[in-house]
Image (cartoon, helix red, strand yellow):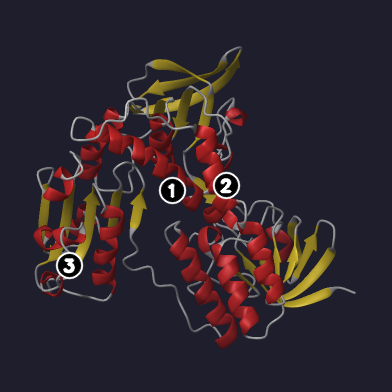
Amino acid sequence: MTKSYDLAIIGSGTAAMVAANRMAAAGKRVAVIDYRPFGGTCALRGCDPKKMLITGAQVMDDIRRMRGRGVAAEGAHIDWRDLMKFKRTFTGPVPAKQEKNYADKGVDTYHEHARFAGRNEIQLEQSGIIAATHVLIATGARPAPLGFPGEEYLIDNERFLELDELPTRIVLVGGGYIASEFSHIAARSGAKVTILQRGPRLLPQFDGDLVGWLMESFDAAGIDVRTGHAVEAIEQTARGYTVRARTADGEAISVEADLVVHAAGRIPDVADLCLDAAEVECDDRGHLKLNEHLQSVTNPSVYAAGDAAGMGPPLTPVSSHDAKVVVGNLLDGNSRRPDYRAIPSVAFTIPPIASVGLSEDEAISAGLKFKRNSERASNWYTARRVAESVYGFKVLVEDETNLILGAHLVGPHVDEVINVFGLAMRHRLTIDDLESTMFAYPTGASDIGYML
């Protein structure tokens, strides 16, 4: 007989876990389906393992900056194999923990490929067809197709984070989060790193002035950043690969590499789900057509969350938030909508860069009247204490309300400090509220008053 569920979830990452736990707690019959180890991108193939590797790279940069300032560590280096072993102490136990959690809650789990066989039916690779009153698509994202010859030689973030050995020459194609973060990890682990970015600068999601300051850290790490370089082909050679690109001026260039990494964007991972069978439509970019409740506009039985939904920024907290919205709508009827206001975003370069709210251009385009407080603060104590020359901020404050419209930070500890700005913006705290707050001193947060 066909098994039937109140909710079948395709995917096993953050959104899936939150939704499954909440629906099971409400007494609903739930199934979770994923052909990969349970845990999803963030825990197994993205945010968490990446930051563990960044910790090692950070130590090497700390030594570099503090050399001659009381730290003597000649010969210090990253042992890549040991660093990967350390990473696996976290990622290794995740799938089993997830499965035990689901078993304890009475959630059925399926380790197999899934595709729709009807509006409320899912065909499983080995187990046959299951039926579900509702289906949640939480399959995450995958690297966007790039369409040039030799694209098959690229490796993705997942394979990079499982490398047992780090090659000597690495080329990253693209200029966003993955390229910026992985380049710092690889360069400080001893690799020769080149970034080929089609656009005019790296990290277009962040303030251009602050990205300009951050580029000094790429130079210090020996990362060869080439903007305005569009990759046209990758060729396999006897010694590795030749990456062929063309500059904005039309000049053809080539770079030799032992490894080439896809870092040029990601799209919702829904292509293999046979969405037509469920009458679930996508737009011309491959994104699901959803209403304001994260529900398919063509099949009300189907919802989506996180990167698969593509409604909010591609961040782990958004996946969790989306899942809570979906569960609320499933249990109480469509009464909830996602709230993507004031979500902080961080690129874990060394040092990190962070942002929340409107950019300066967005605030101008919206016709808002605001004060712009911006300074390169390399001489502030927070930077001088760790011998870091890259430190600065740009904070936008609305004239009439004294509310923060946007905050953009780069330098030591900004990955934590940005959360204070996010809290203030989401809960409409004014700069007077922040300035009257006593932060622990000396900390990164104690600089906030001077940024306002």
Residue position for label 3: 439
Residue labelled with disc 2: 88
Query: Which residue is depicted at the point 40% across and 26% down?
Result: 194
Q: Residue 303 has which mark?
A: none
State the SS at label 2. helix
Spot occupied by residue 367 in the image (x, y as percentages of width and height): 17, 62
Task: Please report whichever mark, 1 or 2, sits nearer to the chain's N-terminal start.
Answer: 1
- Marks 1 and 2 in Cβ contact (< 8 Å): no
Q: Which residue is mark 1?
A: 51
- Residue 380 rendering spot, x and y as whole percentages: 10, 48
Instruction: Name the residue rendered at 49%, 59% in the picture.
Output: 310
Q: Residue at x 14, y 58 (%)?
A: 447
- The residue furthest top is 238
How crowded pointer 2 is (Cα within 10 Å; few <14, some 14-19, many 20+) is rated as some
- Work out which residue is located at the far right of the displayed protein and give it: 1
- The secondary element bearing badge 3 is classed as loop
From the top left corner, tell me how far across and down residue 94 is, in percent: 61, 58
Amino acid at pointer 3:
Phe
User: Looking at the image, which is closer to me, 124 or 419?
Assistant: 419
Residue 289 in view, yes or no: no
Q: Which residue is more in the foreground, 274 or 269? A: 269
Which-is-in-front pick, marks 1 and 2?
2
CA separation in Å, label 2 and label 3: 36 Å
Q: CA distance from mark 1 to mark 3?
A: 26 Å
Helix or strand or loop: what does disc 1 sit on? helix
* Badge 2 amino acid: Arg
Crowd class of label 1 (few under 14; some 14 to 19; many from 20; radius 10 Å): some
Nearer to me, 292 or 65: 65
Mark earlier in primary sequence (1, 3): 1
Q: CA distance from mark 1 to mark 2?
A: 12 Å
Q: Quadrant of the C terminus?
A: bottom left
